[in-house]
Amino acid sequence: MSRLIVAAIITGPADTVLASARAYPPDLAGRYEFPGGKVEPGEDAATALRRELAEELCVCAQIGPELANPDRADGLWPILEGRDMRVLWARIPEGAEPAVTAAHLHHVWQPRTHLADLDWLAPDLPIARLIARKSPPNVP
Ligand SMILES: Nc1nc2c([nH]c(=O)n2[C@H]2C[C@H](O)[C@@H](COP(=O)(O)OP(=O)(O)OP(=O)(O)O)O2)c(=O)[nH]1
């Protein structure tokens, strides 16, 4: 069975959200995604996401509630290669700038209401559109 992917909606200053341009594979390079990765066996979604954000962005994130897919009872989002993705809101310390590591070419803090204007991985566009219409929750 293919592994679940978890990804973060990281909120930033002035009502922005972090979008990360993938570095690989070549056919996806430069397209934006929500940073995250595969859930390892034995991890829950929040633990996996904290680990992925520490590894890929070198940030210590607080993980908040899920942004469930309104069209599916399990709340998961269908993504590439027939996989499913769980999407969670997240926050990083004020002033922290995510590092660019091997996974990404760069990151942008995109105004939330214009999130869908970026060139997202195709499965992420409906997620970006929903975020643009939603007020972010409080992430303690
Ligand atoms: N992280 C992330 N992956 C996404 C998103 N949308 C989407 O279709 N995907 C797909 C792309 C990849 O096929 C898969 C994630 O794999 P990955 O390669 O980023 O995961 P990883 O960091 O754990 O893997 P690895 O390269 O270290 O082995 O999910 C998204 O918003 N964020």
Image: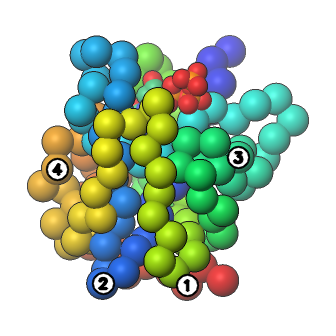
Front residue of 129 and 39: 39
Dot 1: element: loop
How far apart in space, not on screen, are marks 3 and 4 (Cα)? 26 Å
Q: Circle 3 is placed at which residue position?
A: 51
Q: Give coordinates of residue 14: x percent, y percent.
A: 30, 84
Residue bearing mark 4:
118
**First along the sequence among labels 2 and 3:** 2
| Callouts 1 and 4 close, C-beta under 8 Å | no
Look at 43% across and 17% down and name the residue there: 81
At 33% from the left and 51% from the top, the residue drawn is 107
Q: Name the residue located 87 percent from the left edge and 35 percent from the top edge.
A: 42
Image-based side of 32 in relation to 52, left or right: left
Can residue 33 be seen at all in this image of the molecule? yes
Badge number at residue 14: 2
Amino acid bearing label 1: Asn
Instruction: Measure the alpha-carbon separation of dots 1 and 3.
Output: 21 Å
